[in-house]
Every structure is written in C-alpha cells, then in structure tokens.
Amino acid sequence: MTVRPPTLRAKRRYVLARIFPSGYGPDQKDLYFAVFEAVTSLWGDSLASLIQPAVVAAGNGYAIVRCLRGMERELGIALSTVTSCSGQPVTLRSITTSGTIDSLRSRIHAVQEEAKHAEMRECTFDRRDCTVAFCEGDKVDVIEKGFKNTARFYLTTEDLEER
Amino acid sequence: MTITDACVCPYPAGDSSIRRMALEARELGFDRLVAVGVPSGEYSGLPVIEGVLISGGSAKDIAARVKRASTAGALVVVQAGENRFNRAVLGMKGVHVLTGIHAADRHAFDHVTAKMAADRRIALDISLAPLIRQRGAARQKALNRYLDILMLSRKFGFPLTLSTHARSVLEMRSVREVSALASLIGFDVADVEKALGSVDTLLAPQSSVKVIS
C-alpha cells in the first residue's frame, strides 16, 4: 500500500490531557475505551466517526488524545464527561492542543514533574487510619486502611492529623 | 463578577475536604464556592458560602426547614418536586435556588412557575452532574429539560445558576469545561457569565425602586 502524500492526508489535532487522580497511569487501551465510550454516548456514532478519537499515548498522569482538525471542541466536551477508566474513578482535564505530538513533549515533562509520588507514610484523618498515597504542595491524597474499606480521600495538609 | 460554582458537596457527603475542593476550585478558575454543610468562611484562600440543601417531605415541612435554615449569608437550595410542590416552594420566603429540575416530572416547571420564579427572583439551578455522570436516556432527559428551562428563563427573566454538584475533586470541572458543557444546552458566553455570577444577586437582591415625593 502506498502512503498518501501529506497534502492528501487527514489533518489531525492532538490534545494533551492531565489524568486525575494524580499518580494514576491507566493502560492506554483502557483509556481509549473510556474516551471512545464518552464520545459515542455524547455525540452518537455519526459525529464520533467525524471526530475519530484515539489515545496515542498515555503515561503517568497524562494522555495524548487525537482527533480530526476542527473537532477539538467536541472532543474536549466529551473528555470532560469521562468519569471512569476500567472501574477506577478518573477525570481528564485538557491542557493544550497542538498539530504535532512533538510540540506537546515539553508540556508532558511539566505534567510528569507535577505527578510525583509521595513517600508512603501514615496519618489520621477524622479518626481514620490512612496512608498517604500522593502529595503535591498542599494537596494530599490518602487511602483509608482496612480490609474492606480502601476509600481514597482528597485532602490538604491542614486536614491531616500527624501520628 | 464573582465566578461561583453554585453547589458542591464536600466531606462527609463526598470524599474530598472543603479545603481541597477550594484549592482545586481556585486552580480551575472559580472565585467562590457554595458548599453544602460547611460554615461560610475562607478555605485555602477561597471564599466559601454555606449552602443548605433541603429535600424530601411535604411543602409544610420544607417551609419549616427553610425558616430554620435562613441563617445570615447561607444560600438556601430546595430540591424540586412536582408542579404543585414547586409553586408552594417558590412562594416561600428565604428560598434562593430550586434545584434538581432535571429529575422532576415533565410538567413540574411550567410558565406559571417560571413567572413566579422571575417575580420572586428565585434561581433555577442547572446541575451539570447529569450531563457528566449519566448516559443514554437519563442524560437526554436532562438535556431536554434544561433546554426548556433556558427557553423559559429567556422569556420570563428568572435567574439561573450553574453548578457541578461535585462530591469529589474528580467531579469538579474548570470554568472553560463548565462553559463548554453549558453550550450543549444552548448557553452562549453571556448566559454562562450571567449564570456563574448570579449568586451575588441572590444573596443581596436589589430592592425595588421607591418613589419619594
């Protein structure tokens, strides 16, 4: 099969999105299914075929989602309706849009710098024993200890009672 | 204009503390939050207004609870029900916002209730939660209901508020995302700005013009 010349190829746009909760790096395929489900359920099959969503990269705290040029708004709205990925609560916040993946690289580094894991330490929140899962500035994500309850709480350093 | 998310539900209703929600809201472009069950004040550098969400019971019960809840500075939000109930709520003193209209009956909010809301300056809340979290028929029903509300609001002039009803920081959306989601139900930029800034006018309504001779 011959490759089409650049002038005949479909023009695409790449959306860099930050994945929350911080520190969560979903599988690219799972994320694709989540994005595709969000696009199809919101816009229907006909518009989804024009958007042509695809997750071209997913890493620790970021994802690059591709669409056809001119469909960035539709993709952006659909991304804001993504609420879970393979059963895990998740949210995608678009940061920037570009015509090439290369120009998003510098922004990816900035996103990854922000998404650093905290050292595991123990704390108490509202008389519940918790383990710190993630810490970024004043933001602290903790996971409640227990066999059944492993709920994640989103707090600040002020909310914690050190042990 | 103060850009306000008209309803969030922090811990214990949700999994995020009010300080964390305030921190996120500031990063997402909001100037203020209305939080249910949290005393008014400043959290993580962001002003937070206490919201009192009243739901369930008869109109008489609601009236008693509204009277108790009308503390200084709190925003009183009542869950909508059937048409007769909504008319009763719109006639109560101290109610600021009617919410949950997307889940109510098709005839729950008509031109009569719209006129009452406009006369009494009671806002209707456009919760983005069903647009974000629900799929299929439930979301289509919400979109349909909101389109009707927007049409009535443009005709009768009652205020609207926009809220995420977030129980977690993961359910909060930026001002840009809120604006984009609101465009699904026909909001233009001016409508979004007006709705995001309407909490000010609800808490401090302009008094009617008095002619002094």
Image (cartoon, coloured by chain):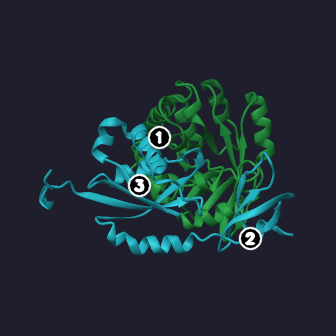
- Image: B125 above or below B38: above
Specify whether A69 is left or right of B94.
Answer: left
Q: Are marks 1 and 3 in contact (CB under 8 Å)?
A: no
Q: Chain of mark 1?
A: B
Q: Can residue A18 be seen in the rendering of this structure?
A: yes
User: Which structural element holds mark 1?
Assistant: helix
Q: Which residue is mark 2?
A: A157
Question: Chain B is which colour?
Answer: green
Discs 3, 2: same chain: no
Q: Chain of mark 2?
A: A
Q: Which residue is mark 3?
A: B190
- Compare marks 1 and 3 and give the one earlier in the sequence: 1
What amino acid does circle 3 point to? Ala
Residues under labels 2 and 1: Cα distance? Answer: 43 Å
Task: Report the chain shown in cyan.
Answer: A
Specify whether B160 is left or right of B154.
Answer: right
Q: Position of residue B96 (x, y in %)?
A: 65, 46
What amino acid does circle 2 point to? Thr
Is residue B160 or residue B29 the one in the foreground? Answer: B29
Q: Position of residue B148 (x, y in %)?
A: 45, 34
Residue B54, numbered label:
none
